[in-house]
Amino acid sequence: MRVPAGVAANHPATAEVGLRILAAGGSAADAAVAAVLATSTSESILTGIGGGGFATYYDASTQTVTCLDFFCSVPGLDGDIPRARWSPSR
């Protein structure tokens, strides 16, 4: 049996948002972005808009795989520590 599309998610509201995007004609990437935004509210303890992660995207038309690494960025780890632009009043 062929399944045209699906969404796997931990929370039913997250899956519902992704499925609605697909039903409206959106791509898998559109559905994934919408689901990530939805999970920011349905599971706010575990994730958020400012959080990090990894995503693997397969483009069937070009048969290419792209891995996105947006896990974390910490200022100063490259050796360039920015100076404070203000100091708190005492």
Image (cartoon, helix red, strand yellow):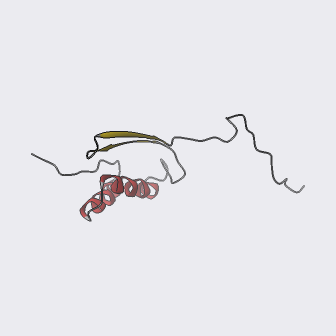
Position of residue 30 relative to residue 79, above or below, is below
Q: Position of residue 38 (x, y in %)?
A: 41, 58
Q: Position of residue 75 (x, y in %)?
A: 67, 42
Front residue of 77/35: it is 77
x 33%, y 60%: residue? 17
Q: For the C terminus, give its image quadrant.
A: bottom right
* Residue 78 as seen in the image, left or right of residue 28: right
Q: In this view, which residue lies farthest toward the front?
A: 62
x 75%, y 40%: residue? 81
x 38%, y 40%: residue? 66
Q: In this view, which residue lies farthest toward the left?
A: 1
Front residue of 12/71: it is 71
Q: Position of residue 71 (x, y in %)?
A: 51, 40
x 32%, y 57%: residue? 18
* Residue 28 as seen in the image, left or right of residue 75: left
Counting the numbered discs, the total is 0
Front residue of 39/87: it is 87
Which image quadrant for residue 24? bottom left
Q: In this view, which residue lies farthest toward the right?
A: 90
Q: For the N terminus, give its image quadrant.
A: top left
Which image quadrant for residue 76? top right
Q: Position of residue 89 (x, y in %)?
A: 88, 57
* Residue 3 as seen in the image, left or right of residue 18: left
